[in-house]
Amino acid sequence: MPYTDAHDVLNILQINLLYETILIMSNDAVQGTKVLIVDDSGYMRQVIRKYLEPKGFVIIGEAQDGWEAIQLYDKLRPDVVTMDISMKKLGGIEATKKIKAIEPNVKIIMVSALGEARFIKEAIKAGANDFIIKPFAEERLVSSITNAVLKG
C-alpha cells in the first residue's frame, strides 16, 4: 500500500520524537559526569570545555601533558578523560596506559590531529574508548563521551 504524504510526515515526526526522547534520557544520564581535559593547547582545552559544560558535564581539571594528566587523574578521579596524543614530557598513548593501570574502567576519549591508522590502533590498544580526529564537531565529542558513559 503506498504511503500518503501525511503518513510519511507522521512517521518522520514519530522518529524525531523518539530521537529527542533518547537524547533527553542520555543527557539526563550524563549530567554531572566528571571530565578531565588533557591537551597541550590551551585553545583546544577551552574549546572542549565550551562544548561540554553546557551539556551538563563537569570539568574538574585540565592538564597540559601526560604526566600532569596522570597526577590529576589519581587525585581527582574523573569519570572521563579527553586525551591528546602529541604532548611534551609524556604523550597521550603512554598516559592512557598508565591511567588505565590505575583504573581500568575509566573512559578515555582520544582527541588528536594525528588521525593515521597506526595512532588510532595504538590508542585503542592502550585502552582508549574512542578516537576523535581534530578538528571535530561538538556533537561528535558529546556523543562519544555520552556513549562511553552509557556503556558503563
Image (cartoon, grey):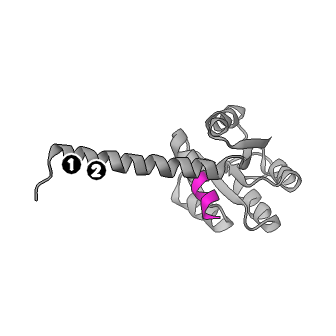
Q: Is residue 114 left or right of residue 94?
A: left
Question: Is-magenta flag for residue 147?
Answer: yes
Disc 1 crowd, CA 10 A, few/some/many (<14, 14-19, 20+): few
Q: Which residues are magenta?
A: 146-152
Q: Amino acid at mark 2?
A: Asn
Query: Which dot marks residue 11?
Result: 2
Q: Position of residue 6 (x, y in %)?
A: 19, 43
Q: Residue at x 67, y 47 (%)?
A: 31
Q: Position of residue 15 (x, y in %)?
A: 36, 50
Q: Are marks 1 and 2 in contact (CB under 8 Å)?
A: yes
**Quadrant of the image for the C terminus?**
bottom right
Q: Residue at x 82, y 53 (%)?
A: 73
Q: Position of residue 104 (x, y in %)?
A: 75, 68
In the picture shown, does residue 113 fall above or below 103?
A: above
Q: Nearer the viewer, residue 73 or 1?
A: 1
Query: Which dot marks residue 53?
Result: none
Q: Position of residue 148 (x, y in %)?
A: 61, 58
Q: Residue at x 69, y 50 (%)?
A: 83
Q: Amino acid at mark 1?
A: His
Query: Which residue matches tag 1?
Result: 7
> Mark 1 and mark 2: span between their CA atoms?
6 Å
Q: How many marks?
A: 2
Q: Residue at x 14, y 47 (%)?
A: 4
